[in-house]
Amino acid sequence: MLWSGWIVLLTTTEAYLWYAATTMNIISLSVVSIYNEVKRGRGRGPSFLCKSVNST
């Protein structure tokens, strides 16, 4: 659902649940991104570090 002002209609409990769910979603996306980066780099660190080291 696109942002349409519905969040102001939430009760305090619903708002806390929404914030908790949103925060957990962001954390899970970050964990998956880190996992994929490590798996792709095979333990060599983040790919942006490897590119900068190889370019010098």
Image: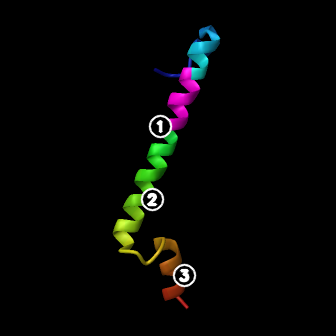
Residue visible at 59% across and 14% down? 13
Q: Which residues are magenta?
A: 17-25
| Residue placed most toward the observer, 1 or 7 | 7
Instruction: Report the predominant secondary structure element of the magenta stretch.
Output: helix
Q: CA distance from mark 3 to mark 1?
A: 31 Å
Where residue 33 sits in the image (x, y, percent)? 43, 55
Q: Is residue 18 above or below residue 39?
A: above
Label 2 sits on residue? 34
Foreground disc of the pair 3, 1: 1
Label 1 sits on residue? 25
Residue 43: in magenta span: no
Rendered image quadrant of residue 12: top right
Q: Is residue 23 above or below residue 33?
A: above
Q: CA distance from mark 2 to mark 3?
A: 19 Å
Foreground disc of the pair 2, 3: 2
| Residue placed most toward the observer, 1 or 22 | 22
Label 1 crowd (10 A; few <14 / some 14-19 / many >=20)? few
Position of 4 compared to 34: left or right?
Answer: right
Q: Is residue 49 above or below residue 17?
A: below
Q: Which quadrant does the C terminus fall into?
A: bottom right
Position of 9 compared to 43: left or right?
Answer: right
Please name the amino acid that badge 3 sits on.
Answer: Ser
Label 3 sits on residue? 52
Q: Is residue 28 above or below residue 45?
A: above
Please name the amino acid that badge 2 sits on.
Answer: Ile
